[in-house]
Image: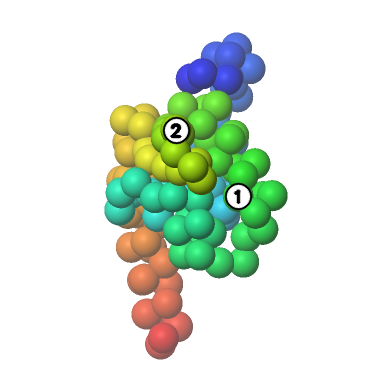
Amino acid sequence: MNGQKTAALPACPVETTLMLIGDKWEVLILRDLLAGTKRFGELKKSIGGVSQKVLTAKLREMEENGLVSRKVYAEVPPRVEYSLTVLGRSLEPVLDAMRLWGEGYKSSLGE
């Protein structure tokens, strides 16, 4: 991990995972980037309800943790694209499990 020190990580692996993706915005960013590379505006629109400030902070944090990569193109206006790193993409089974559980929960409620 780029910004994290292994010694600073919790002993519990579940807690480590929650530290990295325990926020709803982080999970929704992962969900959207699993589909492919997106620009900031596309992420903001598709996530909905997230402020520009929070989305920027979450993307930076996820980049520091090695989950997201940021590519800046030298254009006017500047174009920035975000995508998952190999490490970020490795969370796909976790998100799939969350989706399946959520579908089962909703169906148990008759929705």
Comparing 85 with 111, the one in front is 85
Q: Tag 1's secondary structure?
A: helix
Q: Residue 71 lies in what quarter of the image?
A: top left
Q: Position of residue 76 (x, y in %)?
A: 49, 42
Residue most extreme to the front: 76
Q: Is residue 89 left or right of residue 8?
A: left
> Label 2 is placed on what type of residue?
Ala
Regarding residue 18, the answer to whether it shows in the image is no
Q: Residue 15 lies in what quarter of the image?
A: top right
Query: In the image, which disc is placed on residue 55?
Result: 1
Q: Residue at x 39, y 50 (%)?
A: 38
Residue underneath mark 2 = 74
Where the C terminus falls, by quadrant?
bottom left
Regarding residue 5, the answer to whether it shows in the image is yes
Q: Residue at x 65, y 54 (%)?
A: 52
Q: Tag 2's secondary structure?
A: loop
Of the residues under marks 2 and 1, which one precedes in the sequence?
1
Q: Position of residue 68 (x, y in %)?
A: 44, 35
Q: Position of residue 12 (x, y in %)?
A: 55, 28
- Eyeballing the image, is 73 above or below 26? above
How far apart are the two marked residues, 2 and 1, measured between alpha carbons? 22 Å
Q: Residue at x 45, y 58 (%)?
A: 42
For mark 1, does the 10 Å Cα neighbourhood hold few (<14), some (14 to 19), or many (20 or more) residues? some
**How many marks overall?**
2
Q: Residue at x 67, y 58 (%)?
A: 51
Q: Position of residue 84 (x, y in %)?
A: 37, 38
